[in-house]
Image (cartoon, rainbow, N blue to C red):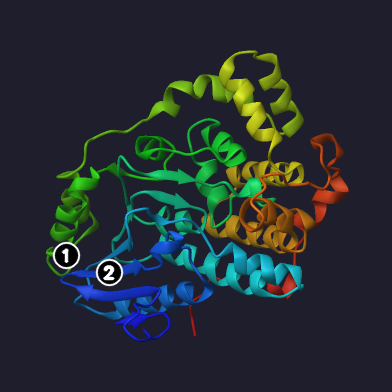
Amino acid sequence: MTASRAAVAGQEPDLIARREGAAGVIRLNRPKTINAVTLEMFRDIDKALDEFESDPAVGLILLEGAGDRGLCAGGDIRALYESSKVKGDLGKILWREEYILNARIAKFPKPYVAFMDGIVMGGGVGLSAHGRHRVVTERTKLAMPEVGLGFFPDVGGTWLLSHSPGEIGTYFGLTGQTMNGPDAIYARFADAVVPSTQLAALREALVNLRVGVSSADVKNAIDRFATGETSGPVAALQPRIDAWFGYDGIEDIVAALQRDGSELPQATLKTLNEKSPRGMVVALKLLRLARASASLEECLVREYRAALEVFRSDDFREGIRAAVIDKDRNPRWSPPRIEDVTPEMVAPYFAEIGADELIFDRAK
């Protein structure tokens, strides 16, 4: 069994990893923070995957979150904020290990099942949406709201969003809007909707599968509990979303929304006006580059370069201050307007960083 931080005086660890029947269960165990993930937890997940990959008695991985609020609300952004303020290196270390873990999950040789019940955001998406079997429920609230923090959808988010139909990924990536379970399936972030009341029965079925279980066996088990839903409310909006977000410049997207005076585009404009102008420009460029990318790893390398620049930026600290620290919801972005974001400001986010590049070779 792997556990982050030894349990003290009966207190449970932040991460619990153990074999249950045929399943190697990984439980994020910080329910008070909606299982926000720390650097130590990422490291312990990686260790657990080492153990489960080499254990012939483990036929599949099951990722779940403690509590009833959600799988994971993201990474520990307070710790990143404090490190960024003092020009520390937590961003460089945490994102390196997290992104390499995201790539590992995508290629894990045993079936990897994620229960994406409740809130699933940011780093929680990275731990679940790259898995082979992604289960959502009627309670799922999935989002990548990073642009509202002066950041961009990372953890391979640009790869995932660029593979959503039409401009659905551009819409979700720039607005940070929430997907429900069927939306997540339509956007290709999930595979099956299972009622939350059936998760315990599905979990039992998975745990009781035979050793040497195939991915088809896992899918069949999930399908027995699935509702069969494949698209949510956003699917009906795709023609309009495609018309608004089918541009390579933020100013063109804003102009398209302004031309349509109906309620939804005006609400979308209001949402975009709350985001970091620089963050939106960087995010859109990353999304467009991801469309032409050959692999998740290629996108993660690009995201890592950009993330290191974000970590140094005032917008990142300001976004977290306004949303999490002071909670005044009134970030003062730099620059404050989209039209003031220059190519010179954006260029450093896409510069090669030499020896600090991500390496995905697991040879030790």
Numbered circle sitting on residue 207: 1
Q: Is residue 305 above or below residue 240?
A: below
Q: Is residue 348 above or below residue 6?
A: above
Tell me the element at label 1: helix
> In which image quadrant can residue 29 be found?
bottom left
Q: Is residue 310 above or below residue 6?
A: above
- Left or right: where 179 falls relative to 150: left
Q: Report the Cα–Cα distance between label 2 and label 1.
A: 9 Å
| Residue 78 or residue 216, whichever sits in front | 78
Q: Tag 2: Cα neighbours inside 10 Å, few (<14), some, or many (≥20)?
A: many
Dot placed on the residue nearer the N-terminal end, 2 or 1? 2
Numbered circle sitting on residue 19: none
Q: Tag 1: Cα neighbours inside 10 Å, few (<14), some, or many (≥20)?
A: many
Locate residue 195, reporting x and y percent. 23, 42
Amino acid type at circle 2 is Val
Seen at 34% across and 55% down, the residue is: 132
Locate residue 258, reporting x and y percent. 70, 19
| Residue 60 or residue 278, whichever sits in front | 278
